[in-house]
Amino acid sequence: MSNRFLLRDALAQFPPYVPGKPPVSAPGLTPYKLSSNENHLAPLPGVPEAVATASALPANYPDPTSAKLVKAIAAHFDVDPAEVVPGAGASEVLSALTNITLEAGTSVVYPWPSFEMYPILASARGAEKRPVDLLSDGRHDFAGLAAAIDDTTRLVLLCSPNNPTGPSITTDELDGFMAEVPENVIVVLDEAYWEFATAAEVVDGVAAFAEYPNLVIARTFSKAHGLAGLRVGFGIADAEIASALRQVIAPFSVSAGAQAAALESLARGDEVMVRAKEVAATRDQFAQDLRDLGFTVPDTQANYVWIALGPEAAVEFEGACAAQAVAIRRLSGGVRVSIGPDEALDRVRKVAAEFAQAARS
C-alpha cells in the first residue's frame, strides 16, 4: 500500500469488485448486456409510477426503518417484522452480516467460485477466508464446507442458486449440512435468484428459516423483480441477529423510491413469479442448446448459464461475443451468460456454434 496515507493493510489482500462489462458497439448491431444478470423485461405496471410519486420530494429523507416495506415483507413470508432487515440490495445485508460476525482471528467458510463479494467482505473485516471448491457439477461440496468449520468460524455463506455456476441447494442438502454446523455459527443462505428456480427439490430458505435459528436468508428485489437500479433487498433473521444487523446498516440506505417500488412489486408477487418462470423456460432451452453443441453447462436454476471453459477459450469466447455487440461475464473457469432478449441469445448461440465447429475441425 502507499505510504502517503494511513490506509488499512487489508486493502492489499483483495481486488475491488469488478462489475459486468458494458457491451461494445458493432456496426448494424443492437448492443446487449448479458454480463450482470439484470432482468431484461420491462418494469411491472405501476412500479415506475410508484417510484415517481415517492421521489417527488427529493429533499426529504426516506423512512429510515422502511416500516411499510418491512411490514409487507413480514406478511408476505409469514415472519415477524422484527425478523426482517431491509438494505440497499442483498449485498448490503451480506456486508452487514460480515460486519457483525467477522474480525481478526475469526474465519468465514464459503463455496468457490461463488459471489465475488464473499472474499472481498471477509478480507475487509480482517477474517481468514476459507473457500471450498465446488464439485465438478458446479454444486456445493457440503462435506468440504463442514470440514472447514472450526472454533474460529463465525460465519458460513451459501449461495442458492450459486452465482456463477447456477445449481441450487436442495432441502436435503441444507438439512444435512445444518445438522453439522454448531448452533452458534451463523449460516447465510444467499437466495438472490431464488424466484427463477424450477426444480422441485430446491430448498425454500424462508421455510428452512423456521427450523434453524442460526440460518439467515438474504434476498433481493434486484433480479426477478427487476429493481437492480434502485438497490433494495432484505434479510430474514432471528430477532437477535436482525437487531445487530440494524446497528451496522447505514441509516436511510433504502431510498423512498426504492421502498415504494419494492412495495408495489411485492404486491404483484404472482406476476413476478410468472415472469421468472418464463425467463427460466428460456434459460433451460438455451442451456440445452449449448449442451447439444458439446459445451459443459451445469444444471442452472438462475437467470444465467455457466459455460465451463479453459482460460484461453474463455477469453476467445468473450471476445467473439463482444464482436457481436454482446457483453458476457468472464470469470475463473468459464463464462457466465445472463438470459436476455432472444436476439442477444441467438448471437451467443452463433458464437458457440462457431466454437464447436472449430473444435471439430
Image (spheres, rainbow, N blue to C red):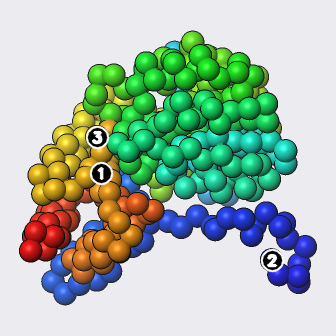
First in residue order: circle 3 vs circle 2: 2
**Which numbered dot is residue 299?**
3
Q: Can you see residue 275?
A: no
Q: Nearer the viewer, residue 99 or 50?
A: 99
Question: What percent of the width, then of the height, locates residue 294?
Answer: 16, 56
**Label 1 residue SS:** strand
How busy is the neighbourhood of tag 3: few (under 14 within 10 Å), some, or many (20 plus)? some
Amino acid type, callout 3: Asp
Q: Residue 289 at what x, y percent from top left?
A: 13, 52
Q: Earlier in the sequence, mark 3 or mark 1?
A: 3
Precedes in sequence: disc 2 or disc 1: 2
Is the residue marked by circle 2 packed among few (<14), some (14-19), or many (20+) residues within 10 Å? few
Q: Quadrant of residue 274?
A: top left
The correct choice, above or below, for 322 with respect to 89 in the image is below
x, y (%) of residue 338? 31, 56
Which corner quadrant of the image does residue 80 belong to?
top right
Quickly name the residue at label 1: 305
Distance, label 3 to label 1, CA atoms, is 8 Å
User: Is residue 29 rendered to the left or right of residue 333?
Assistant: left
Residue 361 visible? yes
Residue type pointed to by label 2 = Met
- Give the secondary structure at mark 2: loop
Residue at x 80% of width, y 53% of height: 126
Number of numbered callouts drawn: 3
Q: Residue furthest bottom?
A: 27
Q: Is residue 115 left or right of residue 193?
A: right
Residue under label 2: 1
The vertical placement of 178 against 245, above or below, is: above
